[in-house]
Image (cartoon, rainbow, N blue to C red):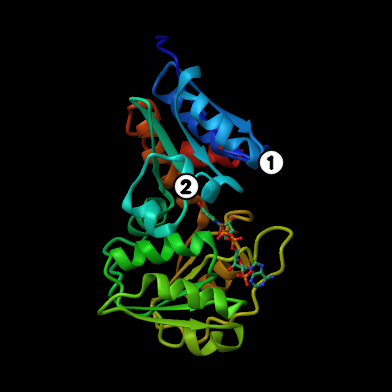
Amino acid sequence: MSDLKLAAVIGWPIHHSRSPKLHGHWLKQYGISGTYIALPIRPDDLADCLPRLPKMGFTGCNLTIPHKEIVLPLVDEIDAAAQAVGAVNTVTFRDGRIFGTNTDVYGFMEYLRVSVPGFRADAGPAVVLGAGGASRAVLYGLVEAGAREIRVVNRSKARAEALIQHFARPGLTLHAVDEAGAAEAVAGASLLVNATSLGMTGQPDHTITLDGLAAGAIVYDLVYSPLETSLLRQAKARGLRTVDGLGMLLYQAKPAFERFFGVTPEIDDALRAAVLA
Ligand SMILES: NC(=O)c1ccc[n+]([C@@H]2O[C@H](COP(=O)([O-])OP(=O)(O)OC[C@H]3O[C@@H](n4cnc5c(N)ncnc54)[C@H](OP(=O)(O)O)[C@@H]3O)[C@@H](O)[C@H]2O)c1
């Protein structure tokens, strides 16, 4: 077998993906004989294409829109994070089997811990805006980290309700709120996470006000384009602590790179610059 290690990100469309830049930077930095490419695969073709990749020398791949859920029946094994989130964003091929995981949970929590040393999920109520795929990863991360109260605010309340039912467990208080209840949900919260596409370039902006957040609260925006969203600007102007979305993108790639190429990569300013370029 060749020494050249191959990995990919699969999506449809895929031209926007920053993953080849990210993994390419690390491959160069660590002098690894490997390649990470973007593979445009139609949703209908995933079942046919995925099992062929190991035969072509791929060690694994990342999956992005619209494949994260479609891939579930195609993997032989998934871990607890992927199971709880209901989506797989990384697969690895080993001994003729396909393993699936979800590294968004790690990416979200790890960057939060790096950005806010001493972060405690049980420090106060958390507000999560959005009830889509990213929100599931956020909720699972916070619940596993010991959050005691989470308020999910979403345009369609039914989706927020389905989400809180999924994560219900003893000792955890969960609320589902529509946008009309947002101000009340924000009151006294120590963490606010935006997991909607609001504020992203080309999308509408938030109407939410941060007035009621606890002093010293953390505002974490998963949107990374633009890097400084209006929500983060609003938070900074109030002297709140802020966490941007680019770090999560970088940190979710770390365990994937480790699995594909066998090296634990560092996240530093050079990587941020390479991905932003
Ligand atoms: N930094 C990272 O590494 C990272 C990772 C994953 C995702 N993200 C970002 O997180 C965001 C959400 O991604 P996703 O995968 O969860 O998407 P998704 O599953 O499509 O969910 C989108 C969410 O945004 C809400 N939304 C969309 N347009 C809205 C509008 N005009 N008004 C109010 N709410 C609106 C949706 O509400 P409804 O349910 O009512 O439709 C839903 O809650 C995206 O911006 C994505 O780029 C970042």
How far across and down, in percent of the image, does residue 172 sit?
30, 78
Is 21 on the left-hand or right-hand side of 12? left
Residue 122, compared with residue 12, is above or below; it is: below
Q: Distance between the residues labelled 1 and 2?
A: 19 Å
**What label sits on residue 138 in the rendered view?**
none
Which secondary structure, mark 1? Answer: loop
Q: Can residue 15 be seen in this view?
A: yes
Say few, some or many: other residues with alpha carbon within 10 Å of mark 1 (under 14 / 14 to 19 / 20 or more): some
The residue pinned by badge 1 equals: 13
Residue at figure coordinates x 41%, y 51% from the top left: 107
133 relative to 17, above or below: below
The C terminus lies in quadrant: top right
Count of numbered tags: 2
* Residue 93 x %, y %: 39, 29
- Can you say whether 55 is above or below 164 in the image? above
Residue that badge 2 annotates: 72
Image position, residue 40 (x, y; %): 65, 34
What amino acid is at disc 1? Pro
Viewer-side label of 1, 2: 2
Image quarter where ligand 1 lies: bottom right
**Residue 126 percent location from the top left of the image:** 40, 76
Of mark 1 and mark 2, the one earlier in the sequence is 1
Instruction: Classify mark 2 as within 8 Å of ligand 1 or not, answering yes or no.
Output: no
Which amino acid does the dot numbered 2 rest on? Leu
